[in-house]
Image (cartoon, rainbow, N blue to C red):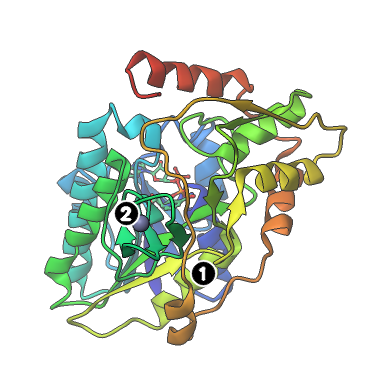
């Protein structure tokens, strides 16, 4: 079938595109080649195995110029959590407005849509407590422990990015009566091709820069925060499955996409160091908290398994090492770019 991938020139889009071409599909991308993501836009276009139409998903006219398609994968988004806290209008326009237009286009085509939301909709996520039971969002007391997020959990985003992803999901509710709608909420996606020069995203790209410069890895706070990492190929497999197994019209299907394994930042730093081809220098802790950052995140993958979707194959350690190895020779931002991004947050009073 012919598949439109919005944001197809980006990290996840390029992996998904290679996967879908291998599966025999024909592709077209709608991407405005955001400068913050694409250092070399021509190379990004050349890498995409199909036509790339340059346009903004939040611009109604961009949708009018597209060919007919059989399915839509909506990936285009502004993705910097910290940056979202001060570029609010831009994030809302693209992530909510753009998603609404994607749904409208898919409905007009009679094409199923698979849209990427984010684990950010859960914010601090689900906690279990002997005193307060199951709670969502801010932690009830220090007896509570973090539990894996389920698709039906309450939305408690703590960043503007997370809010826009939550509202973006709602923006697709209107078309569920016309076409199959699937929302996928990835945890932290890692793998080759991840942006190395965008200091507004990605702790791993920061670790890579520090390792290359022979610096210790800076961990914000104690490093006991947990995250769930999914290899981009495992995510692409879930998206490809959702496309060829669309759900029923009338229901908005939602799936998590993580490894289902909790990794602390300190463990992540160890995994990253294990992938480095040179001597490494341990960890330093920086006592700072960034607005929009959460303590714990992990996906409950049981609904994905029950639906028959492909389960992640990469272990976290292998996925992290794969990212470090495949990115080692590639140009990226120097480690101090992350210090600068942190400085921008500090100036705006968004750290504590
Ligand atoms: N990478 C992750 O860890 C992660 C985690 C959860 C969710 N997601 C979601 O997955 C999707 C893809 O993310 P990614 O990691 O590939 O990011 P990316 O930045 O590499 O790719 C996004 C692509 O969208 C394009 N884009 C941005 N704004 C656009 C606009 N207004 N119009 C057209 N194109 C636009 C960019 O040029 C880029 O090519 C996003 O929706 C993101 O929120 C990613
Ligand atoms: Zn409690």
**Quadrant location, the N terminus:** bottom left
In the image, residue 105 above or below residue 189: below
- In the rendered image, residue 264, in percent from the top left (x then y), is placed at 61, 49
Q: Residue at x 36, y 30 (%)?
A: 83
**Quadrant location, the C terminus:** top left
Q: Residue at x 54, y 57 (%)?
A: 228
In the image, residue 32 above or below residue 308: above
Q: Nearer the viewer, residue 245 or 257?
A: 257
Few, some or many residues within 10 Å of mark 1 (<14, 14–19, 20+) = many
Q: Is residue 122 in view?
A: yes
Q: Is residue 313 left or right of residue 25?
A: right
Which image quarter: residue 239?
Answer: bottom left
- Any atom of ligand 1 within 8 Å of the CB at mark 2? no
- In the rendered image, residue 53, in percent from the top left (x then y), is placed at 36, 48
Name of the residue lying farthest toward the front: 131
Q: Earlier in the sequence, mark 1 or mark 2?
A: 1
Q: Is residue 214 left or right of residue 174?
A: right
Per the rendering, the mark at residue 41 is none
The answer for how far apart the CA atoms under marks 1 and 2 are is 27 Å
Secondary structure type for disc 1: helix
Q: Which residue is mark 2?
A: 121
Secondary structure type for disc 2: helix
Q: Residue at x 55, y 76 (%)?
A: 23
Q: Nearer the viewer, residue 199 or 28?
A: 199
- In the rendered image, residue 186, in percent from the top left (x then y), is placed at 45, 59
Q: Residue at x 24, y 60 (%)?
A: 169
Q: Is residue 76 left or right of residue 321?
A: left
Q: Which residue is mark 1?
A: 20
């Amino acid at each position: 079938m012919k598949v439109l991938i919005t944001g197809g020139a980006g990290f996840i889009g390029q992996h998904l595109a290679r996967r879908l071409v291998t599966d025999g599909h024909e592709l077209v991308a709608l991407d405005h080649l955001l400068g913050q993501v694409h250092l070399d836009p021509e190379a990004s276009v050349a890498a995409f195995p199909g036509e790339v139409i340059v346009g903004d998903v939040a611009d109604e006219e961009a949708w009018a110029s597209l060919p007919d398609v059989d399915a839509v994968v909506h990936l285009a988004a502004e993705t910097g959590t910290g940056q979202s806290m001060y570029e609010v209008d831009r994030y809302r326009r693209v992530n909510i407005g753009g998603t609404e237009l994607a749904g409208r286009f898919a409905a007009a085509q009679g094409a199923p849509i698979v849209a990427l939301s984010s684990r950010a909709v859960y914010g601090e996520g689900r906690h279990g407590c002997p005193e307060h039971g199951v709670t969502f969002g801010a932690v009830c007391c220090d007896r509570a422990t973090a539990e894996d997020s389920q698709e039906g959990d309450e939305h408690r985003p703590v960043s503007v990015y997370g809010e826009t992803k939550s509202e973006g999901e709602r923006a697709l509710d209107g078309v569920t009566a016309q076409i199959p709608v699937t929302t996928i909420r990835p945890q932290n996606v890692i793998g080759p091709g991840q942006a190395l020069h965008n200091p507004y995203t990605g702790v791993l790209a920061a670790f890579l820069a520090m390792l290359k410069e022979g610096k210790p890895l800076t961990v914000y706070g104690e490093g006991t925060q947990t995250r769930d990492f999914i290899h981009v190929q495992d995510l692409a497999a879930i998206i490809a499955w959702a496309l060829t197994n669309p759900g029923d019209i009338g229901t908005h299907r939602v799936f998590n996409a993580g490894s289902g394994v909790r990794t602390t930042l300190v463990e992540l730093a160890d995994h990253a160091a294990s992938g480095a081809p040179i001597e490494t220098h341990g960890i330093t802790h920086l006592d700072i908290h960034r607005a929009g950052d959460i303590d714990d995140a992990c996906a409950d993958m049981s609904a994905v398994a029950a639906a028959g979707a492909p389960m992640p194959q990469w272990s976290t350690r292998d996925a992290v090492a794969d990212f470090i190895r495949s990115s080692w020779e590639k140009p990226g931002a120097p480690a101090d770019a992350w210090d600068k991004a942190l400085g921008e947050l500090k100036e705006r009073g968004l750290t504590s």
